[in-house]
Amino acid sequence: MPALPGRRERWALAALSVASFAYVTTEVLPIGLLTVIAHDLGRSPSETGFLVTGYAAVVVLASLPLTRLTRRVPRRALLTGTLAVLVLGSLLTAVAPGYPVLLGGRLLIGLTQALFWSVVAPTATAMFPPAVRGRVVARMAIGTALAPVLGVPAGTWLGQQAGWRAALAALAVLGLVTCVAVATLLPRAAAGPTDADGGHAGRAPAPDLGRYVTLVVATVIGVTGFLTAYTYITPYLLEVGGFAPGALSPLLLAGGVAGVTGTLLVGRVLDRSPRGALLTPLAVIACALLGLHAFGAVKAAAVVCLCLAGMAFSALAAAIQNRTLQIAPGGVDLASAGTSSAFNVGIAAGSMLGGALIEGPGVHSVTLVGAVLAAVALAALLGEPWAATGAATGARPTRGRAAGRRTRPAGPAGRTPSHTSA
């Protein structure tokens, strides 16, 4: 596969990928350090867990308002500013004298993450021709996929060896380096403000309100399904799979490596088949979770299904972002904020649903329910052509008797010959 054009642009894309790595690591690292932080601050595990759930809630609630508020701010200044606040927030959490300041620093970082995910993909794709948009999204998603494999384990290890404050300070250093790199490397073509309609780098090539709403709904349902099972995959592997506790780390590492592989693989097909790249991961997730439910007690089968699910979920995340940039009914920044919120709603809903299932039917049920929800999301996306409005305004395609057939909806996005300027 030929390299992406533009040396400076490729380095800027790498910097944005590292930024995504830093944000995902920052978001979930307290999970690995939960017991250490709780013991040091004299707080209960549930209170310490709110460092993650409260963070996610801020991302969900703030994405759309902040994106709308900052739509005319130049992208280079905006991304540099979000990363600068990430650095300050990380330093604040590292030196926090108590739980309230630690929580406040986390929520401050959550505000910047809400804005970051809304604008980073449109900014990254604005640096390259539309024909390679999918590859750009996949390259940027490598940082997201690597965070659970490298960032969280490394941060957890550092926190256990040198204290949780050292781990958070290390994230501040990483954020500072990334902030400088983005400010220096992001080219002018991708650094301008959004247009009058709030969409950076112009509008989507095939805007469609019906398709976008379908994508948002399917995202919530599909992510909920995956997280219903995956949030509680550790007790599932112990109780159903019969794995020893010492096998959990290698198993989760294998799932993380599979996720990175999924991101790399989906990048090869996003531009050629954007809908197929979206439908296939959901189908694989449904089958893998169903396989875990049916054959979870067979260790070899459980490992294969675990890796397939991790691979497909990472591919799904990149495919959702890519599809958003193609069918956004208005500004791509606002549309990205919408799907980012939907993704985080799915994460929270899956965690809560899985917890309720464990307390009720038991841990064996989480994979079955997750598979059913993934299948429902797949069915919703299969019906996307019938939800198409054919335009960004929401007007449904006409059905004329004289023509004798329904007007065809807009075709797949991403095949426009023109490149929209920033």
Image: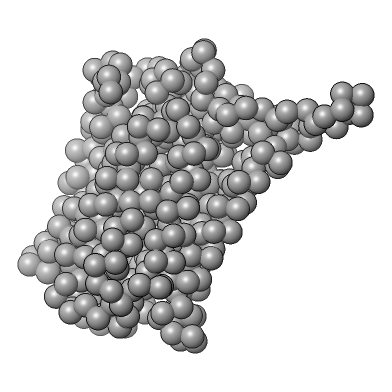
Residue at the (15%, 57%) spot, across then down = 154
Q: How is the image coloured?
A: one colour
Left or right: residue 160 versus residue 238 is left
Q: Nearer the viewer, residue 115 or 353?
A: 353
Quarter occupied by the N terminus: top left
Q: Position of residue 347 (x, y in %)?
A: 45, 61
Q: Nearer the viewer, residue 297 or 153?
A: 297
Is residue 232 among the parts visible in the rendering?
yes
Is residue 33 among the parts visible in the rendering?
no
Left or right: residue 236 versus residue 211 is left
Location of residue 98 (image quadrant): bottom left
Left or right: residue 64 versus residue 9 is right
Left or right: residue 290 versus residue 21 is right
Q: Position of residue 87 (x, y in %)?
A: 26, 47
Residue at the (26%, 33%) spot, across then down = 15
- Residue at far top of view: 418
Q: Position of residue 68 (x, y in %)?
A: 57, 39
Residue at the (73%, 35%) spot, across then down = 389
Q: Above or below — where is 279 with respect to 392?
A: below
Q: Position of residue 206 (x, y in %)?
A: 61, 27
Residue at the (40%, 81%) spot, across then down = 363
